[in-house]
Image (spheres, rainbow, N blue to C red):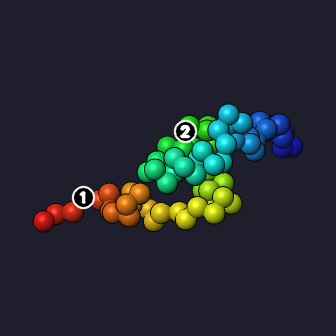
């Protein structure tokens, strides 16, 4: 017989001290989704959903706020 274990409750809310407009401002200033996730105690995916709901355009991966690549380029 299989025993079921009770799961820990899933955190569904962002830290109430940080509002979505502040997240949007920090993201537009160059913070990454992961940086903001650490700040709020949630994942980058959750931050992405919050920012999209705020109407913020998400940068492509590997680009900074100036839309320049952060990857090393050999010349």
Horizontal and vertical percent position of residue 48: 60, 56
Query: Are dots 1 and 2 in contact, CB under 8 Å?
Result: no
Whole-Å distance between the Cαs marked 1 and 2?
25 Å
Instruction: Give residue 52's quadrant in the image.
Output: bottom right
Left or right of 28? Residue 47 is right
Q: In the picture provided, is 32 more to the left or to the right than 75? A: right
Which residue occupies the foreground of this view, 54 or 72?
54
Quadrant of the frame with the N terminus:
top right
Q: Secondary structure at mark 1?
A: loop
Can residue 32 be seen by looking at this rendering?
A: no
Q: Quadrant of the C terminus?
A: bottom left
Question: Can residue 3 be spotted in the picture?
Answer: yes
Q: Nearer the viewer, residue 60 or 4?
A: 60
Query: Which residue appears at 68% of the width and 60% of the height?
Result: 53
Vertical order, 65 against 9 (above or below)? below
Residue in the picture at 75% in, 44% down: 12
Image position of 69 (left or right of 41):
left
Q: Which mark is residue 20?
A: none
Q: Position of residue 34 (x, y in %)?
A: 51, 47
Compared with 56, 9 (above or below) is above
Mark 1 Cα shell of 10 Å, populated few (<14), some (14-19), many (≥20): few
Q: Which secondary structure lies at badge 2? A: helix
- In this view, the residue in front, 53 or 6, is 53
Q: Which residue position is annotated with label 2?
A: 38
Say which label, 1 or 2, has the lower sequence index: 2
**Image height of 16 relative to 29, above or below:** above
Residue, far right: 1
Query: How far across and down, in percent of the image, does residue 70 sit?
Result: 32, 57
> In the depicted view, which residue is nearer to us: 65 or 1?
65
Residue 16 in which image quadrant: top right
Residue at the left extreme of this rendering: 75
Q: Which residue is mark 1?
A: 72
């Amino acid at each position: 017989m299989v025993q079921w274990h009770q799961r820990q409750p899933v955190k569904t809310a962002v830290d109430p001290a940080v509002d979505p407009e502040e997240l949007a401002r920090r993201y537009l200033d160059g913070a990454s989704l992961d940086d903001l996730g650490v700040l709020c105690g949630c994942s980058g995916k959750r931050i992405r959903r919050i920012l999209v709901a705020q109407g913020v355009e998400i940068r492509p991966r590997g680009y900074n706020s100036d839309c320049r690549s952060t990857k090393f380029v050999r010349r």
